Amino acid sequence: MGASASASRRGLANSLFKPDREYKILVLGCMGSGKSTLCRHLVRIARGIPPILPYYQHTLQNNVLELYKAIAELADRMGIGVELYEAMTGLQQLIASPLYNEILNRNRRPELPPNHAFFVANAERILRRDYMPTESDLLYMYAMTVGLDQQTVRMHSAIFELYELPGHHVFRRKWTSFLNYTTTVIFCVDLSELCMGAFYSGHLKDKTLSIFKDLLNNELLRKSSFILLFNKKDLFDEWSPGYNFEQLAPQMRSGQEALSFYRNLFLHLSPVKKIYNHVVSLIKSTNLGGTVVDSLTTIIRSNKENVQPL
Ligand SMILES: Nc1nc2c(ncn2[C@@H]2O[C@H](COP(=O)(O)OP(=O)(O)OP(=O)(O)O)[C@@H](O)[C@H]2O)c(=O)[nH]1
Ligand SMILES: [Mg+2]
């Protein structure tokens, strides 16, 4: 986005937000759908200063070690390369062996941790003793959120209380306690799920849609507005070619058709509420937090009377 566009957005937002008003934003979605990644984007935009990078060193190194374990276990389950990996002493040999490629060739990517390709490519650098994370490394990092993650950010003279609630099903049972006085729910949907068997017949079946439906129907969120972020478009684009989407609905011929169909299922859940929505890749494009800020601005402008400050 150019300087003048962001300046005009800032001007618009400044005229809409009352300086001393606070807005409660709840970031929800299934486990791993991108909630923390989004919050980091928003905080980065709002504060304008880089995160404290050394703080994330061990999490990223742990992501590499988790990957090592996952490759070895998956290879074991697939009955390949057992001898190979037993004879190996470290991650680099494991990755350099034909084993990882064989897993990819047999299309078992969804069973590995998210963004394994990034961690495979950068394993050596990340495991170095003097490793210092970069800001772009942080985009690929995964640490399950436990409990409540809350940050206060000031954007355009409005104060946002940003709450991320964890997506794991054990924690989802507690979401209800946090719904009151919510201005806006930002709900993240992981599009890569559409290319996983479990989405059609396993534990992911009807899950994300029904969670979102329950939120829409929740009395505590009656006055809240909703932003849907269909995230991980990059992974979807990588995995969807050749995938059989007829499992989703008959005559789905391409990934694009499947994505539109799935998106409409969400958007048609509420005939009355306008649901703002974006298809994004939180790790590939810049200014994605800005996309969300634009929607928040529009919501607050169009619902000035209805949207509740805290
Ligand atoms: N490829 C890709 N990966 C993404 C994208 N957005 C997030 N991720 C990755 O997905 C993983 C999970 O992201 P998080 O933001 O931690 O997910 P979360 O929703 O906070 O997960 P929980 O806290 O466990 O509920 C991380 O490894 C991110 O790097 C995206 O657009 N594309
Ligand atoms: Mg999280």
Image: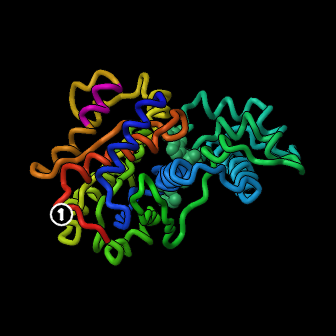
Residue drawn at x 41%, y 57% is 157
Magenta-highlighted residues: 255-261
Residue 32: tell me if it is visible.
Answer: no
- Asked whether, in this view, residue 104 is left or right of residue 257, the answer is right
Residue drawn at x 60%, y 44% is 139
Q: Are there few (<14), some (14-19), or many (20+) residues within 10 Å of tag 1? A: few
Majority secondary structure of the magenta segment? helix
Depth check: 273 or 79 in front? 273
- Asked whether, in this view, residue 89 is left or right of residue 243, the answer is right
Q: Mark 1 points at which residue?
A: 217
Q: How many numbered marks are there?
A: 1
Residue type highlighted by circle 1: Asn
- Which color scheme is applied? rainbow
Depth check: 281 or 300 in front? 300
Using the image, determine if residue 184 lies above or below residue 249: below
Residue 184 is situated, as x and y percent measured from the top left of the image, at 30, 59
Residue 172 is situated, as x and y percent measured from the top left of the image, at 39, 68
Depth check: 92 or 262 in front? 262
Residue 128: tell me if it is visible.
Answer: yes
Using the image, determine if residue 194 lies above or below residue 163: above
Depth check: 277 or 235 in front? 277
Residue drawn at x 69%, y 52% is 63
Q: Is mark 1 on a helix, strand or loop?
A: loop
The stretch drawn in magenta includes residue 193:
no
Residue drawn at x 31%, y 74% is 176
- Asked whether, in this view, residue 270 is left or right of residue 81, the answer is left
Seen as rendered, the residue at the extreme bottom is 177
Residue 89 is situated, as x and y percent measured from the top left of the image, at 88, 47
